[in-house]
Amino acid sequence: MKNSEIKNSSLPLMEHFYTIQGEGFYSGHAAYFLRLAGCDVGCVWCDVKDSWDADSHSKVDVNTMLDYVQKSKAKIAVITGGEPLMHNLVELTSLFKKQGIRNHIETSGAYSLNGKWDWICVSPKKFKKPLNSVLEKAHELKVIVLNKSDFDWAELNALKVNAKCKLYLQPEWDKSSKIVPLIIDYVKKNPQWQISLQTHKYLQIP
C-alpha cells in the first residue's frame, strides 16, 4: 500500500530538538527538528544510521509532536530522517498548519511526496534516485559533494527542478578540507549554484 493511502496518527520518532537550522536557504533560522526513523536509501556517509531501522524507535502521536513544537515557541518545524516520506505525513502536517507552524521537509526524494509543505528541500542520493515528481516541487536542491563526479550528479538533478528552486552544493563533512576548494571553484564558474555549509557543526550546535 502506498504511503499516501494510510493516515498516521503516530510515527516512529528517533529524536526531536529545538535548534538553529545549519544548512541551505534557512540556515541561521530557529527551527524544531523532528527526526523520523526509517530509511532504505543507505548513504555511506550518513551520521544518523541509528535512524534507519524504524522498528527500533517508539511511535509518537502527532499531537504529542505538536506539543513539543508549541512549547518551544518555534515557528518552523523541520521533518527529517531517515527518509521521512516513507511515512504518510498528511495528518502531521495538517495539524501543524492549523496551528500556524511552517512545515519544512528534508528528503532524498526517493518516495512520493505527501503532506502540506511550506518548504521542500530535496537532497538527491545516487543510492536510491529521486522521483521526478518530487524534484519538480522542490524549493531547494541540496547536493552532497563527496567527489568530483557529484558535480555531474548535481547538474543532472538541476535539470529536473523548477526555475525558482535554489541550488546548493554542500561538502560531505568528513571530506570538507578537500572538497570545499573544489566547490568554490565550481560555483565561481557556475554561479547559479551556491555553497551550503553545515554551520551547526562549525558552531557545535546540536
Image (tube, rainbow, N blue to C red):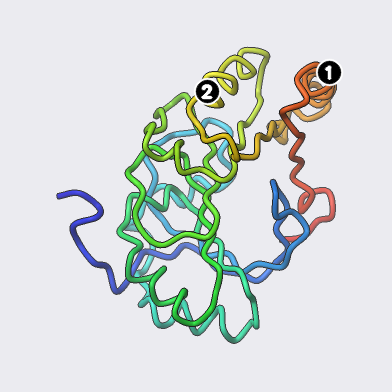
Q: Where is residue 143 in the image (x, y as percent from the top left)?
A: 61, 31
SS for callout 1: helix
- Which circle marks residue 127 in the picture? none
Around disc 2, counting alpha carbons within 10 Å, would you say few (fewer than 14), some (14 to 19), or many (20 or more)? few
Q: Where is residue 16 in the image (x, y as percent from the top left)?
A: 55, 68
Comes first in the chain, label 2 or label 1: 2
The picture quadrant where one finds residue 9 is bottom left
Give, as a three-letter code, the residue at label 2: Leu
Measured in 3D between alpha carbons, the distance from the residue under mark 2 to the one under mark 1, in whole angstroms, is 21 Å
Q: Give the residue at x 56% y 39%.
A: 46
Q: Give the residue at x 63% y 74%.
A: 75
Give, as a three-letter code, the residue at label 1: Asp
Q: Quadrant of the C terminus?
A: bottom right
- Which circle marks residue 185 in the picture? 1
Q: Are marks 2 and 1 in contact (CB under 8 Å)?
A: no
Around disc 1, counting alpha carbons within 10 Å, would you say few (fewer than 14), some (14 to 19), or many (20 or more)? few
In the image, taking residue 121 as reference, residue 183 lies left or right, namely: right
The picture quadrant where one finds residue 196 is top right
Q: Position of residue 168 (x, y in %)?
A: 68, 35
The front one of 138 and 129 is 138
SS for callout 2: loop
- Seen in the picture, residue 161 relative to 26 is either above or below; the reply is above
- Seen in the picture, residue 18 relative to 68 is either above or below; the reply is above
Residue bearing mark 2: 159
Q: Give the residue at x 65% y 71%.
A: 18
The front one of 16 and 197 is 197
